[in-house]
Amino acid sequence: MADQALNAWGWDSAWPAPAKLNLFLHVVGRRADGYHLLQTVFRFIDRADTLRFAPRQDGEIHLLTPIPGVSPEQDLTVRAACRLQFESGCSLGADITLEKRLPMGGGLGGGSSDAATVLLALNHLWRLGFSTKRLQQIGLELGADVPVFIGGENAFAEGVGEALEPVMLPPAWYLVAEPAVQVPTAAIFGAPELKRDTPAIQLSEWRPGLGDNDLEAVACRRFPEVAEALACLRQFAPARMTGSGACVFAEFASADEAERVLACLPENLRAWVAQGLFCHPLFRLV
C-alpha cells in the first residue's frame, strides 16, 4: 500500500460506501443453475453510507447500529467482517457503526457497497495484506455486486456481474428519485415475464445513453410507485431505473441543471442530486 493511503485511513476514519447506478442493464441469458447473465455499466456516485470501526481484542464482531428487521446473520456488514476474519484467521475483532443514507431495496447497491467497504477497511486496519482479487473473491460469495465496489473503478460488467472491465465515463450529475417502496431483487428476477434474451453487446459498441434496463418493465408493473417516479422524471429528461429498483434517475450535464429539475418535482417524491465519480473513494487502498 502507498504510504499516503496508510496515513489517510485509520481506526478513527469515516469510511465511505458509495452508491452505484446501472447506466443500462440487459439480461442476455440464464445459466443452468438459474443465475441470470447480465451486461451493465456501473457508475459510482458521491452519495454514500458511512462506516466507522473500532478494534476489539476478543475477536468478536458487533454492529452497533443494527438495521431494524435485519438480524446480524443476515446483515452484509457483519457477514463480510466474519468472512474476512475466517479467511484470514485474524484474531482481532471490530465494533462497526453504520450510518445509512442509501435506501434498502433501492437498486443503489447499498448493502453490497457496505460489505465491500468492510472488506477494504478491515483488510487495511487488520493489516492482512489481501490483494484486490482475493477480496473480490470473498466479496462475490456475499453478493454479485460486491466485487465492483472492491475493484473501485466504474466498469462494464458481464456474467452475473463479476466479470469487470474498467470504463472511462464523462463528467455527469444525476437526479435520483426514491419511490416510497422497497423492491425485492428476487421478485424481479423470478418474474416469468422478465425479458431474458437481449442480444449481447461489446464494450466498444456502448456509449452513455445507450441501452435500457430490462428489469424496469417488471418493476413498473408490480410496483406502481416506480412507474410514477419514472413518469415524473421523464417530463424533464430521459430517465431509467437502476438495478432491480426502486430508485430511478436522470442524467444531466451540470449540477445546476439537475438542481433546477429537482426543484420542479413534487414534494412527496424524495429525490436528490449526486455527482458521478471517476472511481471509488477507496480506490487503490489495497
Image (cartoon, rainbow, N blue to C red):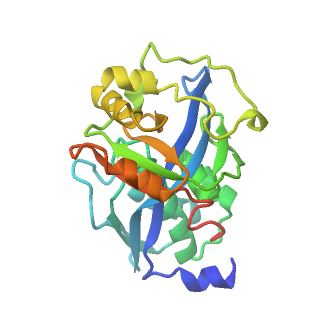
Residue nearest the observer in this picture, 236 or 233? 236
* Tally of numbered tags: 0
* Quadrant holding the C terminus: bottom right
Q: Position of residue 110 (x, y in %)?
A: 42, 51
Q: Is residue 47 left or right of residue 179?
A: right
Instruction: Check the image and name the residue furthest to the top.
Output: 193
Residue 282 visible: yes
Position above or below: 52 against 41: below
Q: Is residue 251 left or right of residue 39?
A: left
Residue nearest the observer in this picture, 47 or 140? 47
Residue 89 visible: no
Give the quadrant of residue 60.
bottom left
Residue at figure coordinates x 42%, y 33% from the top left = 234
Residue nearest the observer in this picture, 202 or 237? 237
Residue at figure coordinates x 62%, y 61% from the top left = 279
* Quadrant holding the N terminus: bottom right
Q: Position of residue 49 (x, y in %)?
A: 39, 61
Q: Position of residue 130 (x, y in %)?
A: 65, 66
Q: Position of residue 24 (x, y in %)?
A: 57, 35
Give the quadrant of residue 162.
top right
Position above or below: 51 against 229: below
Position above or below: 3 against 249: below
